[in-house]
């Protein structure tokens, strides 16, 4: 692809990522509102968060059979349309059961959407510049934390939890037209993919130790992050003593520092190597994970420092990790592999959220009990991920190919 056309494409992918992540993250600071509005438990809230991931994971697994047989642009257009409609349904849902159903519907499109974005970066950007490109797309994550989550929590606190979802759906409309304008047709892989039986293609993807290690890395990354993330607001309010109105500041500060960190991590990954950067970030991420899940009553300042460290070290390791994973498949396999990878990502994050809800319990005065156990799980997953990442070799490297 012409380098002049890369930036508009990457920025429209970042805007897609912004709404995609915002749709997921906005639920977390609103956990107390959901639990109050529907009179549900921590476990039921965990299921509400996990339902999107499980739905997205299942459809991504199914999508791995056929997604490479279509132009990537067409896949994004269809999936983003479904995502907008699903988010709108979430905003209009009048009950816990219907909201749960709307989250499942939205996940059906969000899962394939996330893998398609990574496939586009893998197809359009050479490996030597891919981490930097990935960091631009991941800026959507930071922007969602800076703008979307604090704004969503403030708006919900002064109106209702319905409004943030309706706003996200509204923002998605101009982004949809941006897709039509800036995303080129990307069907160079289709001819090769259609030569193969979908089941043969799926078997080729799985019949590789290299790609299986890539899937394992994604699963460990999700467990190391999303087992603790959904329960931070409840723990901070009921155990640490942070005001509910201050929760948005956690995501605001975390997002601001990660904007800088994402670009820096992308640059360092291209220069020093994605594995080295991933390993360093994974070790450093264990520090804020430990302290956040063991915090006593402290000041907001301490919480914000730890949250910033978690976003920088924990969140930005997704840039080198996805660069490694994306490089483990050939172009005609990439969409199917990354759809399968998205399935693993969504199922693992959903499992992590649900497992976190099972490990913790409610104590006196709605305090969160056993949150430190969830922290130890996240630390273990983060450390195990390092040797797994080291074993992943880019296709075409001098290392043995999978």
Image (cartoon, rainbow, N blue to C red):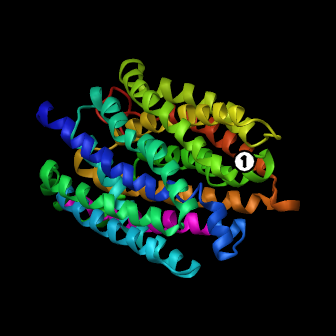
Pick whichever, 347 or 206, lies toward us.
Answer: 347
- Image position, residue 147 (x, y; %): 44, 45
Instruction: Tell me where residue 28 appears, x and y as whole percent.
Output: 58, 56
Q: Is residue 57 visible?
A: no
The mark tally for this picture is 1
Residue 237, visible in the rendered structure:
yes
Residues shaded magenta:
46-70
Q: Quadrant of the C terminus?
A: top left
Horizontally, residue 47 falls left or right of residue 367, namely left
* Residue 62 shown in magenta: yes
Q: Which residue is mark 1?
A: 236
Badge 1 element: helix
At 45% from the left and 37% from the top, the residue drawn is: 321
Q: Quadrant of residue 73?
A: bottom left
Please say if 91 is above or below 341. Answer: below
Is 198 on the left or on the right of 103, as rendered? left
* Prevalent SS, magenta region: helix
- Which of the 4 image quarters holds residue 351? bottom right
């Amino acid at each position: 692809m012409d380098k002049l056309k890369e930036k508009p494409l990457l920025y429209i992918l970042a805007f897609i990522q912004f709404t995609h992540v915002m749709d997921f993250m906005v639920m977390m600071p609103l956990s107390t509102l959901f639990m109050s509005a529907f009179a549900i438990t921590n476990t039921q809230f965990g299921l509400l968060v996990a339902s999107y991931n499980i739905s997205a994971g299942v459809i991504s697994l199914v999508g791995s059979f056929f997604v490479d047989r279509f132009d990537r642009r067409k896949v994004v257009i269809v999936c983003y349309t479904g995502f907008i409609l699903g988010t709108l349904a979430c905003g209009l849902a009048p009950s816990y059961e219907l909201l749960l159903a709307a989250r499942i519907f939205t996940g059906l499109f969000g899962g394939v959407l996330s893998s398609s974005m990574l496939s586009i970066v893998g197809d359009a950007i050479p490996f030597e510049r891919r981490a930097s490109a990935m960091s631009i797309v991941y800026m959507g994550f930071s922007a969602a934390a800076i703008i979307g989550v604090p704004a969503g929590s403030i708006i919900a606190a002064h109106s209702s939890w319905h409004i943030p979802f309706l706003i996200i759906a509204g923002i998605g409309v101009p982004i949809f037209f941006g897709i039509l304008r800036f995303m080129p047709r990307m069907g160079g892989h289709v001819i090769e993919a259609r030569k193969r039986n979908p089941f043969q293609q799926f078997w080729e993807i799985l019949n590789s130790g290299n790609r299986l290690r890539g899937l394992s890395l994604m699963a460990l990354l999700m467990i190391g992050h999303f087992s603790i993330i959904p329960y931070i607001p409840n723990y901070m309010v009921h155990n640490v003593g942070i005001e509910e109105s201050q929760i948005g500041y956690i995501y605001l500060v975390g997002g601001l520092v990660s904007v800088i960190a994402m670009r820096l991590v992308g640059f360092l990954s291209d220069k020093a190597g994605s594995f080295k950067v991933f390993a360093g970030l994974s070790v450093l991420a264990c520090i804020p994970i430990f302290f956040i899940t063991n915090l006593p009553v402290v000041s907001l300042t301490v919480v914000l420092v730890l949250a910033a460290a978690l976003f920088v070290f924990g969140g930005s390791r997704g840039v080198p990790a996805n660069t490694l994973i994306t490089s483990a498949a050939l172009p005609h396999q990439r969409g199917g592999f990354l759809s399968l990878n998205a399935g693993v990502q969504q199922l693992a994050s959903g499992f992590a959220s649900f497992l976190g809800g099972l490990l913790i319990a409610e104590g006196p005065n709605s305090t969160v009990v056993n949150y430190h156990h969830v922290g130890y799980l996240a630390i273990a997953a983060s450390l195990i991920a390092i040797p797994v990442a080291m074993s992943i070799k880019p296709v075409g490297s001098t290392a043995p190919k999978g």
